[in-house]
Amino acid sequence: MFQYLARADDKPWQSGPYAGVELKILHKNAATGGLVVLRKFAAGTHVPAHTHPVANEWAYILSGEWVESEVTYGPGTLFHAPKGERHGPHFAQTEVISLTVFDGPLMVA
């Protein structure tokens, strides 16, 4: 048996750090501030280049089309951004849902 269980349908969507982005927090580590989240990007959402100064980010595309450096990526693509490393800009060509893990607090700079 797993020690923790979360059902996405039981969690609300919350406003994300950018317009057009919503977060569904599946788990928050009380000790580290790390998060496991579903992220939903509305079609046409642009996310500017940014860093996460205190957390590594892993993002796995579940659905939709994501444009990064003029290349379109779809379901099954995994991205990693080390903490403090600038990444983006990103563009959601269609609605995009990703499963994303931050190993520390979600801060954007």
Image (cartoon, rainbow, N blue to C red):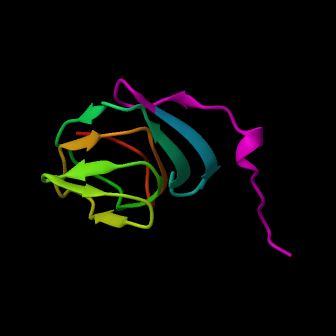
Q: Position of residue 75 (x, y in %)?
A: 44, 60
* Magenta region includes residue 27: no
Asked if residue 32 lies left or right of residue 29, the reply is left
Q: Which residues are magenta?
A: 1-21
Residue 52 in view, yes or no:
no
Residue beneath the point at 31% across and 49% down: 66
As drawn, is 9 to the left or to the right of 94? right
Could you say where residue 46 lies in the image, as x and y percent from the top left? 25, 33
**Residue displayed at 52% across by 37% down:** 23
Spot occupied by residue 87 in the image (x, y as percentages of width and height): 19, 52
Magenta-drawn stretch, dominant element (helix, strand or loop): loop
- Residue at far bottom of view: 1
Q: Nearer the viewer, residue 105 or 4?
A: 4
Judge by depth and name the residue closer to the eye, 55 or 58.
Answer: 58
In the image, is residue 83 above or below residue 46? below
Vertical side of 18 occupied by 88: above or below? below
